[in-house]
Structure formats: structure tokens, C-alpha cells
Amino acid sequence: MTAVTAPTRRPTNTDVPARFRDLLAAEWIKLWSLRSTRWTLPLVFLFVVGVSVNASLADHRNWPTYPQERREMFRMYGPVRDAFPEAGYLLLILASATIGALTIVGEHQSGLIRATFAAVPARRALVAAKAAVLAGVMLVFGAVTATTSFWVSQAILADRDAGWSIGEPGVLRAVVASAALVPVCALVGMGLGALTRHAAGAVAGATAVLVLVPMTVDSDEHRWIAEAYNALPLAAWLRLLEVHPDVINLDPYPATVTGSWLTLAAWSAAATLAAITLTHRRDP
């Protein structure tokens, strides 16, 4: 009598856990499948560079009318302000946060997140891959935008002997900080998107935290208010833009360069950790 043996079960594709690089590839495809990503990034790039060019051309045109004292003041902070104008970067901040929010809110609102979690139960790895792709793309975008704005603006000002070179003290730091601000804001948007699961709520929260609060706080009144202000991403970025000691000394409670870098890093880490934790613990 022949013994009957159970057939050997071959492992299927669903039995093989997804590798992290596979998750990165999937998140890359999902990020670029968003129309907001494909359209927003080039439009924001053109806007930011355009604002920088407009500011530089205005100073170039008006330079002959500036008295000597104003020219000396301009050389202290003007070139970096023309390279990274607040008007352009405020839009860049909001656009980055919006893209970050939509990377996770869009999946919740469309119901795609349930299918994603069914295919990849490892939620923490999935969100970590999403954050890595988002941060990488936005860092490259920020670097291209900041570098272009800087070189174009300084080329315009060089004709008046008012531009800066990248090798001057603190200038490279300002360019790197302007590039790093973009992924920080995108990750904050993603964290708020994981919290609210609603596009309008996430964008409103990002607008308040990244723009409205730092612009309305009077950091000269009390030290504790100044320290709270210095712990915000916008304040950290503005501090890293200041390269002349006389400008820094005008602030009664200035933040340190190291503290400002740590602020940007802390916001990135906290936002990513919040997105991972909230997505892991809550039902889709």
C-alpha cells in the first residue's frame, strides 16, 4: 500500500514580503502619478525664480539712485534677500506642504490605501518609503530652485558690483538651507495629512504652522516667545540666511546656526515619525 503524501505548497508572490526598494519604486510611481506633482513643481519653480529675477532687476535698475549708506547696507543682506525672496519662498513652502499632504490624503480619500495595506501589511515600512521618496524628490527640487535663484540673481547684481559669490562666508549655507526647507515642509504636510486625512485640514494646518504663526509672533518681546519662534521652520530658515554679523546682532534673542539646523532636522523627523505612527495605529 502506497502512502499518500500531501502536495508541497509552492510559495506564491503574496507570501514574499515586499522589499524596501520595491516599496520605494511603488511610491515613486504614485508620487509622479499625481497631477499636482507634475504641474505644481515646474510652475512653482518658475514663480520663485521669477520673483528673484524681478527683485534683482529692481535693485540693479535703482542702484544709481541709492546713496552710499544704502549701498553698504544692501551689501550686508540684499543679495541673499534677492536670491531667496520671502514672497517666492512662502508660496514654495505652501506648495511643498500641499504636495506632502496629498501623497497620503489622496490615498485615504480614494480608498486606495486599503488595497495598498492589503498588498503590503507592513504599514510602517510603507510610510517610511513614502517619506523617503517625498523627501528625496523635494530635496532635489529645492536644490535646483535655490541654486538657480542664487546664480541668476547674483549674475544680475554682479554688473553693479553688488553680487555675492558662493565662496563667501555663509553664502553656501544659505543656499543649502533654502534647498533643505522644501523637503522639511513637504514632510510636515505629510504628517498633518496622516493626522487629519483631509486635504483642506492638512493644508490649513500647514499654513498655520509654517507661515501664519511665525509671521505673527513678536519674537522681540520676551525670551520664551523668541525661543518658541526660533523653533519654527520658517524662523530657522531665515536665521540661516543671515550671513552678516551686524544683521544678526539686531535681534535681541538670535538663534544659533547649529540650533537652526537642528530645528529643521527635528521637524522632519517628528513629522515622519507622526505619519508612520498614526498610519500604523489607525484603521485605514
Image (cartoon, rainbow, N blue to C red):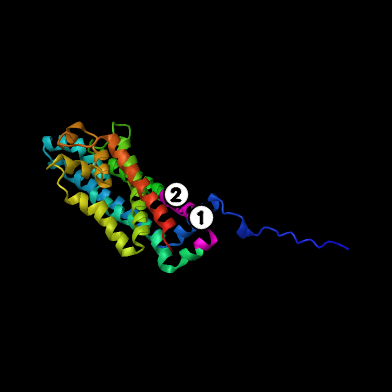
Asked whether residue 130 is drawn in magenta, I would say yes
Quadrant of residue 81 within the rendered picture: top left
Look at the image and tell me whether residue 151 can be seen.
Answer: no
- Dividing the picture into quadrants, the one containing residue 39 is bottom left
Looking at marks 1 and 2 on the same chain, the residue that comes earlier in the sequence is marked by 1
According to the picture, the residue beneath numbered tag 2 turns out to be 132
Where 162 falls versus 271 (above or below)? above
Q: Farthest residue toward the bottom?
A: 110
> What stretch of residues is rendered in magenta?
116-137
Q: Nearer the viewer, residue 160 or 246?
A: 246
Amino acid carrying mark 1 in the image: Ala
Residue placed farthest to the front in the image? 1
Residue 181 in the figure: left or right of residue 23: left
Identify the mark at residue 99; answer none if there is no mark.
Answer: none
Which residue has dot 1 on it? 122
Taking the spot 52% from the left edge, 63% from the top edge, the residue there is 118
Residue 153: percent from the left, percent from the top?
Answer: 28, 44
The span from disc 1 to disc 2 (Cα, nearest Å) is: 16 Å
Query: In terms of image quadrants, where is residue 227?
Result: top left
Residue 266 location (% of width, % of height): 33, 43
Q: Amino acid at mark 2?
A: Ala
